[in-house]
């Protein structure tokens, strides 16, 4: 087994055993508590960050307000140039940052490198977008008038990210916010704080080299209390939060109470529908990667496989065989298919979910369990499980962040399967496996999938930068990344210009003086 020297990679990123968790650009502000970061790979203490004090938070916000004044009037293409340089720096540091993601979070090295590539891709997208922040010209009902709309920078964007994509989600928000003229304050997950420190340094170096105000990008760290400072702060023009539905509801209420703006990316309970016309090989590849990739800790992970009765036994047999070939171990070893869960709390949630499924009548066809001893000494490695279940089971209705796949049979027409798929409170990602054009189009129609993402002949997991990412229902309704997701980071303004010497009033109203 060839495993990467992780310490050498950490050194390249400028990480120490003890790191400041409060940063304005590269400037540090002393914190008070400590967040240790233990790797789920081997249980080792990677390093620690100190937590942000209320005084430190106020200093960050003061700097962000100052930075916004100059950054907002910087021409958008010049803002794009800074993001371009950030993307180039990420290309240089892709290997060490990808290794850190893998080691601190537990996803495979290939996935860690892939996540950094997502950062690079969103930078490329944002650079082009910096010259395309278009408004719209409209015809006025009044003669001699011209009407148009334009988009202006919004202000300070607060970013709260999750552990499962500890660098990509931040970059989706930051790259777009920056070209839109906003400044960013980021609170990364307490479970992956070193990824936050590493990313902040990379961007801060670019800002410093270009004499850009350091407050354009800041870092804070801490528990939910620090998050509350952000959500309750009227200076935060937008809160972009990624996490659980429970967390999202708290954030949404806090921000709404001050009539602020929020962008929510919450839970998924994603399904693949397998019709009689499905290609079995493609189904297998999409379902297995969707279920076990990142150890089932993607928001787009495949949770449910809804299979027509005519294909059910064949799919079931193929899945059992495929799962028997999976290699579980150190994610820095490229020969492994699956690494660990993020921590032992997640392991307990995984075990509890299996027991709840069994108690509700689920039949385990691929047994789960915790792997022990030797390379599994961190206690975070589990075996992926497959359970025959019914969609109405309470546990099936919930999102368990772990490699558990529920196998569900459907009978009759496609609309029966669509009903099962849509019959959960989450609405993030969905897929159908079919070679039947009518089935594919029905799935994509208004009467089809109710999810923000609907795929044909690819799995639920994975999203391209060019498309807007997000979901409906209790997934939160937010959109990040591609398409016109940039508009949430800006304020829209409608303008009317009268180029005559007359002042006709709207709706033909007369007002003689």
Image (cartoon, helix red, strand yellow):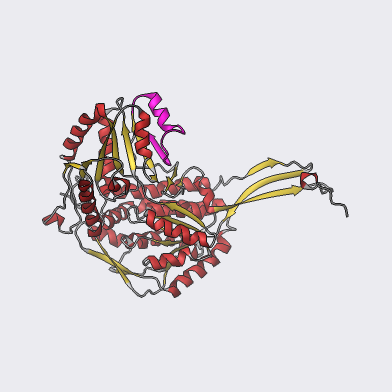
Residue 68 in the image: x percent, y percent?
A: 55, 62
Q: Nearer the viewer, residue 414 or 501?
A: 414
Identify the magenta region: 434-456
Q: Residue at x 20, y 61 (%)?
A: 43
Outermost residue, left direction? 373
Q: Residue at x 17, y 37 (%)?
A: 320
Residue 442 in the image: x percent, y percent?
A: 42, 29
Residue 31 in the image: x percent, y percent?
A: 37, 74
Residue 460 in the image: x percent, y percent?
A: 34, 40
Quadrant where the image shows the C terminus: bottom right
Q: Quadrant of residue 335?
A: top left
Is residue 86 shown left or right of residue 460? Answer: right
Above or below for 168 versus 440: below
Is residue 401 shown left or right of residue 463? Answer: left
Q: Nearer the viewer, residue 504 or 151?
A: 504
Above or below for 175 versus 305: below
Q: Nearer the viewer, residue 159 or 141?
A: 141
């Amino acid at each position: 087994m060839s495993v990467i020297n992780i310490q050498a990679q950490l050194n390249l990123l400028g990480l120490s055993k003890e790191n400041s968790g409060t940063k304005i650009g590269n400037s540090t502000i002393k914190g008070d508590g400590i967040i240790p970061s233990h790797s789920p790979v081997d249980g080792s203490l990677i390093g620690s960050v100190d937590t942000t004090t209320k005084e430190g938070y106020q200093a960050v916000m003061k700097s962000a307000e100052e930075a916004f004044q100059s950054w907002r009037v910087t021409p958008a293409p010049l803002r794009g140039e800074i993001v371009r340089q950030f993307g180039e720096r990420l290309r240089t540091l892709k290997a060490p940052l990808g290794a850190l993601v893998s080691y601190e979070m537990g996803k495979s090295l290939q996935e860690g490198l892939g996540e950094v590539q997502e950062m690079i891709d969103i930078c490329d997208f944002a650079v082009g977008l910096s010259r395309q922040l278009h408004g719209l010209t409209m015809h006025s009902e009044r003669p001699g008038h011209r009407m148009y709309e334009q988009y202006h920078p919004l202000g300070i964007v607060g970013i709260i990210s999750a552990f499962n994509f500890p660098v990509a989600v931040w970059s989706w928000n930051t790259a777009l916010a920056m070209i839109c003229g906003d400044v960013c304050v980021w609170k990364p997950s307490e479970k992956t704080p070193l990824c936050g420190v590493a990313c902040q340094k990379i961007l801060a170096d670019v800002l410093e080299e270009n004499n850009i105000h350091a407050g354009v990008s800041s870092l804070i760290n801490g528990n939910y209390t620090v998050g509350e400072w952000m959500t309750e702060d009227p200076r935060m023009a937008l809160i972009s939060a990624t996490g659980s539905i429970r967390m999202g509801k708290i954030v949404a209420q806090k921000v709404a109470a001050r009539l602020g703006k929020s962008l929510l990316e919450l839970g998924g309970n994603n399904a693949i529908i397998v019709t009689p016309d499905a290609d079995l090989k493609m189904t297998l590849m999409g379902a297995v990667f969707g279920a076990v990739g990142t150890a089932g800790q993607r928001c787009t992970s495949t949770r449910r496989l809804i299979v027509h009765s005519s294909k059910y036994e064949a799919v079931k047999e193929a899945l059992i065989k495929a799962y028997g070939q999976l290699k579980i171990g150190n994610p820095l070893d490229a020969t492994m298919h699956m690494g660990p869960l993020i921590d032992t709390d997640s392991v307990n949630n995984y075990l509890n979910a299996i027991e709840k499924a069994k108690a509700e009548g689920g039949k385990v066809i691929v047994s789960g369990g915790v792997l022990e001893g030797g390379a599994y000494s961190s206690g975070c490695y589990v075996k992926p499980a497959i359970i025959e279940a019914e969609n109405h089971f309470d546990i099936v209705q919930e999102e368990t962040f772990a490699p558990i796949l529920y196998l569900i049979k459907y009978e009759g027409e496609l609309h029966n399967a669509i009903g099962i798929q849509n019959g959960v409170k989450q609405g993030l990602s969905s897929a159908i496996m079919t070679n039947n054009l009518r089935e594919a189009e029905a799935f994509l129609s208004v009467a089809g999938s109710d999810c923000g993402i609907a795929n044909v002949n690819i799995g639920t997991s994975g999203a391209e930068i060019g498309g807007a990412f997000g979901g409906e229902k209790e997934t939160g309704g937010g959109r990040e990344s591609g398409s016109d997701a940039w508009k949430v980071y800006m304020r829209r303004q409608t303008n009317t210009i009268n180029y005559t010497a007359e002042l006709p009033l709207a709706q033909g109203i007369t007002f003689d003086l």
